[in-house]
Amino acid sequence: MKENVFEILMYLFEHYFQDAVDIDPNRAQIEADLRDAGFPDPQILKALAWIDALAESRDLPVSALGPSAIRIYTSAETARLDVECRGFMLFLEQAGILTPGSRELVIDQLMDLDDDLIDLDQLKWVVLMVLFSQPGQEEACASMESLLFEPPHPTKH
């Protein structure tokens, strides 16, 4: 069974995160639960390191990037984040769900995943996890949840 880091993150997000991205108190039990669920040790360790990096980002200073900052993606980023993903992140910024600083955190976390190509669903979940982990982002997190879980309303032409 080939499980990737993203699948473990989804499992953790669905089963363990209540109020914050913080799994240190029961880490040994969580590792055991993940092994019992069939996830391989190397991927478990990568997923937990990803969560640790996300939790540590709460202590970083807020980015000084202004709202008019333009993001130029590196070749490594464009190789893993297709036009649809980059366009969706721009939409999230324009909608006020992501700030330039949170966008950078999302990109960093996406690039730390072990997938060669990130799809739109993965992006949406990572955005939700990042917003969930950051203090003061409750409104943005709620907006992202509605984008993720509520079906789009059809428009009449």
Image: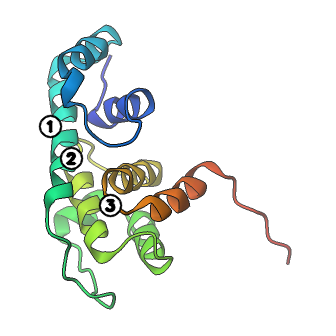
- Residue type at the position of mark 2: Ala
Residue shown at the point (22%, 40%) measured from the top left? 51
Helix, strand, or loop for circle 3?
Answer: loop
The number of numbered discs placed on residues in the rendered structure image is 3
Would you name the residue on which mark 3 appears? 81
Where 105 sits versus 119, above or below? Answer: below
Residue indicated by mark 2:
55
Dot 1: what SS?
helix
* Residue found at x 45% / y 69%: 97
Q: Give the mark nearest the N terminus, 2 or 3.
A: 2
The amino acid marked with disc number 1 is Ala
Among the two numbered marks 1 and 2 on one chain, the one whose residue lies closer to the N terminus: 1
Residue 87 placed where, x, y %? 44, 72
In the image, what residue type sits under mark 3?
Leu
| Name of the residue lying farthest toward the bottom | 68
Mark 1 — residue? 49
Give the CA distance from mark 2 to mark 3: 23 Å
Q: CA distance from mark 1 to mark 3?
A: 22 Å
Q: Is residue 43 shown above or below 58?
A: above
